[in-house]
Image (spheres, rainbow, N blue to C red):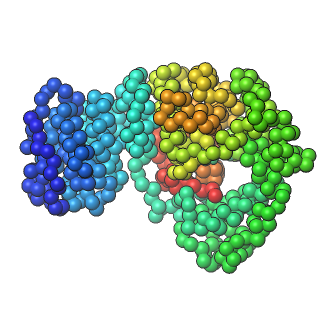
Amino acid sequence: MPFKRPAPEPHPRSDSQSLESSSSALQPSKHARLEPSEKAIPDVTLYIVQAKLDPSSLSELFRLAERHAQRLCSNATEADVIITTIRMRRRLERHIPWTLAKQKAIVTPQWLRDCVKQNKVLPCVDYAAIQELRTETEKNCPECNLAPCLCGDSDSEVETPSNQPASSKHRPTKAGLEETQESDMHAKIPARLLHPDPSIPTPLDKLNYASRYACRRASPLTCPNQELVRELDIVHRSRAMESEERNALSYQRAISVIKAYPHRITSVSQVQKLPFIGQKTGTMVEEFIDTGKIEEAQTILASDRFKALSLFTSVYGIGPNTAHRLYSLGLRSINDLEIYYGVERDEPQATGPSELQEVEMQKRPHYWRGQDQDKGNRKHGLGDSWIRIALELREDLAIKIPRAEVEEMERIVMAELAELEPGCVSTIVGGYRRGKPESNDVDIVFTHPDAGVMKGLCKRFVRRLYERGMVSHVMHLSGFHGHNPLRTTHWDSLEKALTVFTLPNSSQIHNGIRRRLDMIFAPPEVYWTAVIGWSGSIMFQRDLRQWAKDKLAMKFDSSGITRRYDSKMFFPKTEKEAFDLLGLEWVAPEWRNADA
Ligand code: TTP
Ligand code: MG
């Protein structure tokens, strides 16, 4: 039965009585039945909030609902799912009483579009329209009543809810992207691996900027004292480049504390009592308040040595030790490096990708030293063969990667992976997950519900990407290492490949720019610890380890949580559960920016 075409929404109401009467002219008659032919969403009653929907979107939604839903109702009280573009509680309350809203699943229009596209009811939580109602949306999702629940923390094995790469469920915003990969995502995946980041908002009031541990502070991407942080970071980087590690760490800690300080610093007394603000940093803070600069930082910036070492270490794979050596040889510029390494700027690469891959796979499998050590390469470097190539790639690798391209890279990679091994899930980690608008590289953690599948998958997958022309270089490809409870080495036991990747012509963004792509393959039981470890920031996860050690006598790293005294391992089923296990308040990734 055709529905009336939408008309402008009437004035806002605040109670369900008025809501019902006001909406009836705009919504279909109560429980209007559609033709049974194209029913794809059985037994779900929909209510569309028309406010803020332009006429063409509105008619599109009506059309989709008409064609695919069984019922559209004219009264929100009777709906299972409420569709709205409204994102804020206050606005929604003008149309739906809050008490009623809490009893419903409230989703964005994309939910309906995707349900129709995929011909099934999708979990509502991934499309929750009102952040504050995510939990309720999850709980009231009709999908849970139709099939084994995908929305909770259950361990049960259930069918994947979608044929999109499951990772996209971490980001409802991605739901609008066209998915080309339609096949084989129906493998059985435990709900816990699909569960998106917990909806619980970061309890900022429970975090404490004066804590000694960055993992108990809320650290935004940009803080009210960002200029000061920038100045202090010059000193920090200089110390790091001079291999004065303890001193560098002191600055890194002070920066991390200031990063979480929620007020603008106008007097040193505000921060003097905070942890890791010693006399030296206190003086620098004071100087900055007075002059807007820190003299030592300015002197460092102007020094030829700092300039040269910064330039050298900006080449991926050159760490401080190599940079010192090059500097002591009298080299000062990239041009000097190119001459030294015999790089012909306008000539094709001396080392072809296939040769490189052999070199790096076989001869350099061991430089990753765990996450304590600058991704393993910054201090000791990758060796001359790599540096030659890194110099050739330098211009590309220096271009930052916007978020849309990060997402496209993951989409393409997941589509490829699904062909090789259906049923994998992934999370984009690193700076992207913390909300950085642009990243230096892309870091993705993968897993599969079947731990057996993970073994060797990294190598197989890199080989495939290489053969498909997407991966041109592999800097590191680890084998699988068992967990090492004694921690005699700093290895995490995850398979990982640090690669150079280019989006194929078929992708939505094809700019031909070569990008750094790090892929980490975690067995399912340590997926969430891998996600946490690789989400960073460096100080955040460093202090997470410190906290686990100091307070719980536990060992935390990307490859698991271990109780020290008996080496018992713990396997959190969600990221939130990992925080709970460590006795920590949940901190959303956007608040983990504890580095400059
Ligand atoms: P990176 O990719 O080096 O850093 P990033 O993703 O935070 O930022 P960008 O790529 O834009 O420069 O590292 C990814 C994560 O790996 C990082 O967030 C935390 C972890 N990591 C460490 O734990 N220790 C380290 O020394 C480094 C470099 C990274
Ligand atoms: Mg990164």
Residue for point 76% across, 26% down: 351
Where 8 sits versus 230, above or below?
Answer: above
The residue at the point 19 percent across, 45 percent down is 47
Splitting the image into 4 quarters, where does residue 557 fall? top right
Residue 481: image x %, image y %? 66, 28
Left or right of 582 in this view: 277: right
Question: Where, quadrant-wise, is the C terminus in this rendering?
Answer: bottom right
**Where residue 436 sits in the image (x, y, percent)?**
54, 51
Residue 168, given in percent of the width and then of the height, sits at: 43, 37
Where residue 272 sits, quadrant-wise, is bottom right
Residue 272's place in the image compared with 531, above or below, is below
Q: Residue at x 19, y 32 (%)?
A: 67
Query: Would residue 584 be visible to someone looking at this image?
Result: no
Q: Taking 149 as reference, is 247 left or right? A: right
Q: Nearer the viewer, residue 383 or 487?
A: 383
Judge from the rendering whether residue 240 lies leftward or rightward of residue 84; answer left or right. Answer: right
Res. 230 in view: yes
Q: What is the number of callouts on the image?
A: 0
Q: Is residue 480 above or below residue 306?
A: above
Location of the N terminus (image quadrant): top left
Q: Residue at x 49, y 39 (%)?
A: 407
Looking at this view, name the residue that lies furthest to the front.
346
Frontmost residue, 251 versus 53: 53
